[in-house]
Image: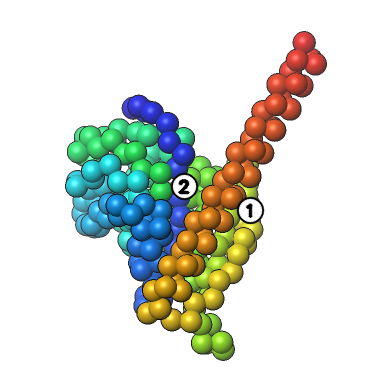
Amino acid sequence: MSKGERNHSGIYIQAEGGTGKSYLARLLAEEHDRLGAHTPSINKKRFDLGSGYKGEKTIIINELDASCGMTFRELFQVLEPDSATQLSSRFKDAYIINDLTIITNSDTYWDWCDSWFGKKNKEYHQLMRRIRFVIKMVHDEKNKVIKIELWNYTATRDLKEKAKQAFEKLQTYSLKSVENEEEFRKIASEILERIKKEKNIDSKRKVITTDSTDQSECSDN
């Protein structure tokens, strides 16, 4: 049951263990809101997102996957971009008002999305429009750095299987060492600024599209 509006963003961080994805998630949360993040624990038998939630603006879910007991419909509800939502009783009737959710996993984003759906109900667009931003972290052995790429989902309609191709790379960052917090935090801040910029562009695009549609309808009448 929706009770209000929010301007929510979803970020998926994919990286192998030891690359610093959980650290980056924490830095993103701190740069977004100094009050910190709600970080629920993952229990393979029962995932309780609402337990301990106190209205934090950021939620970090480390190593979330489809084995947590949550259905993809419930995941959609948690990540709904436009409305704050009261979750079901099994989540303690939690009223989630965060505007940023960060999910980390070692799987590629495409494999992770696939894992939530059966053979028929592959609602890629509905999931990807909720998690529009993907961060890929890989060790660049040649240059001895960690390469961090920020990607953005650009589709405005359901492209079915082709939704996986509707991503553009926005920026590439190079991190010399995970232990260099100042450098890592600077990258986290720049990522958030770029995401904010893309969301503003998207909002303006939606306004233009709506105005064009309204004008077309008026002309038809």
The residue furthest right is 219
| Occupied quadrant, residue 89 | top left
Q: Amino acid at mark 1?
A: Ala
Label disc, if present, on residue 166 of the rendered structure = 1
Q: Position of residue 206 (x, y in %)?
A: 64, 35
Q: Position of residue 86 (x, y in %)?
A: 30, 33
Tag 2 secondary structure: strand
**Is residue 136 visible in the rendered structure shown here?**
yes
Q: Position of residue 35 (x, y in %)?
A: 29, 52
Residue under numbered circle 2: 9
Residue at the image position 21 percent from the left and 51 percent from the top:
46
**Is residue 108 visible in the rendered structure shown here?**
no
Q: Where is the C terminus found, in terms of image quarters?
A: top right
Left or right of residue 106: residue 211 = right
Residue at the image position 46 percent from the left and 35 percent from the top:
82
Viewer-proximal residue, 151 or 16? 151
Viewer-proximal residue, 129 or 125? 129
Structural distance between the alpha carbons of marks 1 and 2: 18 Å
